[in-house]
């Protein structure tokens, strides 16, 4: 039964990811980012966009080349591989779209930190003591949310391309909801396209000293 539950949970997670990517692609095509009224978008896609465009271009070339080759020498595999190739191409376009249409959101009471796909961490503005530009690296290439350190001095990292460049120092140990459950942390790291400008905006909003 445990194996069945794990398989169902994995399948549901994969389905949610697919739906998120297709919704993001649709929003990108009609230019309707997920930015509710009363919030200010903060972009973070510049780091990964060149790499994703390179993958998209390579995948598009691969689909065309394979289709030409298989249509001449291995016809039975042409349609299945074409479907898989197009699916992979659309998947990567959806990934790029997610980074574009799901920016961080600065609201009246909280900064909503996102990772492009589905992660979301709300940081109350009144818990931010200071803002500084600090680089962190997350372990692995696929992980976007990572808890660094232990106890009340831990740092929550929400990365893009396994990196963060802005750090929010909180007024004290604060419990935040993360995709992996609640975590009590003292700092939050995130990636933004313009760290100094964003830090200045946060400083003005919360009168927090900028380092």
Image (cartoon, rainbow, N blue to C red):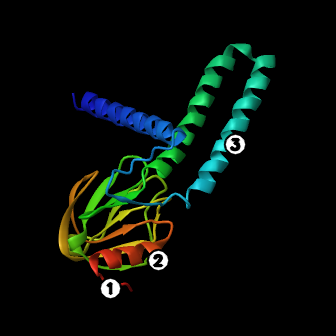
In the rendered view, would you say 209 is above or below 177?
A: below
Mark 1 / mark 3, whichever is N-terminal: 3
Left or right of residue 137: residue 188: left
On residue 58, the disc is: 3
**Residue placed furthest toward the top:** 76
Q: Name the residue under label 1.
A: 209
Residue at (69% x, 31% y) in the render: 63
* Residue 191 spot, x, y in % from top left: 44, 65
Assess disc 1: are there few (<14), some (14-19) or many (≥20) residues with their C-alpha within 10 Å of its C-alpha. some
Between residues 203 and 62, which one lies in front from this camera angle? 203
Indicate which label's residue lies in the foreground, 1 or 3: 1
Quarter that holds the N terminus? top left
Assess disc 3: are there few (<14), some (14-19) or many (≥20) residues with their C-alpha within 10 Å of its C-alpha. few
* Residue 66 spot, x, y in % from top left: 73, 28
Residue at (39% x, 47% y) in the render: 34
Left or right of residue 176: residue 146: right
Residue at (76% x, 31% y) in the render: 65
In the rendered view, would you say 202 is above or below 161?
A: below
* Whole-number angstrom distance, CA of label 1 to CA of label 3: 45 Å
Check disc 1 and report its element: helix, strand or loop. loop
Left or right of residue 78: residue 207: left
Quarter that holds the C terminus? bottom left
* Whole-number angstrom distance, CA of label 2 to CA of label 3: 34 Å
Check disc 2 and report its element: helix, strand or loop. helix
On residue 196, the disc is: 2
């Amino acid at each position: 039964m445990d194996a069945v539950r794990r398989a169902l949970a994995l399948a549901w997670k994969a389905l949610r990811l697919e739906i998120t990517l297709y919704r993001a692609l649709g929003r990108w095509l009609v230019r309707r980012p997920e930015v509710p009224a009363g919030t200010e978008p903060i972009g973070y896609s510049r780091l990964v966009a060149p790499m994703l465009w390179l993958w998209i271009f390579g995948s598009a070339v691969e689909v065309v080349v394979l289709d030409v080759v298989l249509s001449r020498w291995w016809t039975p595999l042409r349609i299945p591989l074409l479907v898989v190739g197009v699916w992979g191409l659309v998947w990567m376009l959806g990934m790029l779209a997610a980074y574009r249409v799901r920016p961080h959101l600065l609201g009246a009471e909280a900064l909503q930190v996102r990772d492009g796909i589905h992660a979301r961490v709300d940081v109350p503005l009144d818990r931010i003591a200071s803002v500084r530009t600090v680089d962190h690296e997350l372990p692995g290439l696929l992980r976007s949310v990572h808890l660094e350190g232990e106890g009340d001095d831990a740092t929550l990292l929400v990365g893009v391309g396994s990196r963060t460049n802005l750090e929010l120092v909180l007024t004290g140990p604060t419990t935040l909801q993360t995709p992996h459950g609640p975590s009590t942390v003292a700092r939050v790291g995130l990636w933004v396209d313009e760290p100094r400008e964003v830090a200045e905006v946060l400083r003005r909003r919360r009168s927090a000293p900028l380092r």
